[in-house]
Amino acid sequence: MKLKTCLVLLAILSGIILFSACAHYKVTKNLEQPVEDIAVCNIGEIRDELPVGFEEEDKPTLEHIEKFRSYLKTELEKEGVFKSILIMNPESPYEVTGSVLDFKKGSGVVRFFVGFGAGNAKLTASLKLIDKNTGEILFAGNFKQTVGSYMESGDKMFQRVAHDFAKELKKQIKKLGKRK
């Protein structure tokens, strides 16, 4: 009986570890051509593409979207993908745009008092890098994050999505560089 219980607990623990190690995104368009590392990139519009009937008060605020754009700028700068990253610069040859596909504000108070996933915040965003000269989508993906700890702000999911996008873009740029 003890052995059976230990095996079940081990299987559950293994599943949790495996799930947490999985990527929280799906690349929908791999980078196929190099990106000029001396180029300037613009952080463009992030649109609302939430399902029809999504309550207005449950949607991300303009403040959330502006923070998200700021996180994208910061994370792309950390990765060193472009020479310069600007917000709303029409002269840039590259632009990062996207949309919010799913969103839940969550509640830190509920996460604290109830736990077990109650009050979690979640975000699913579609992000893409566009060559503004040709209009071609160079790289794209759907990125999903949650906040399940009462010690974290719901805004942390925006930062994590931005980090995942910048990290994967940098990874794909490096992969292209090795093929040459």
Image: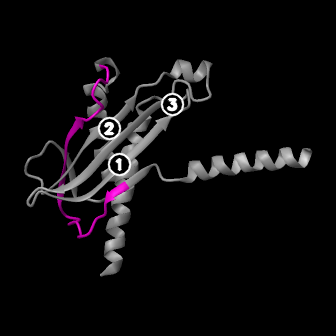
Q: Quadrant of residue 35?
A: bottom left
Q: Residues within 10 Å of mark 2 (few under 14, many from 20)?
A: some
Element class at badge 1: strand
The answer for how far apart the CA atoms under marks 1 and 2 are is 9 Å
Tell me the tag on residue 142: 1
- Relative horizontal placement of residue 126, taking residue 4 as reference (left or right): left
**Depth check: 99 or 88 in front?**
99
Instruction: Tell me which numbered mark, 1 or 2, is placed earlier along the sequence.
Output: 2
Residue 79 visible? The answer is no
Q: Give, as a single range, the part of the protein colored magenta.
A: 27-55
- Disc 3 element: loop
Question: Can residue 19 be seen in the rendering of this structure?
Answer: yes
Q: Are marks 1 and 2 in contact (CB under 8 Å)?
A: yes
Label drawn at residue 152 = 3
Foreground residue among 120 and 96: 120
- Please name the residue shown 48% across and 21% down the image: 107
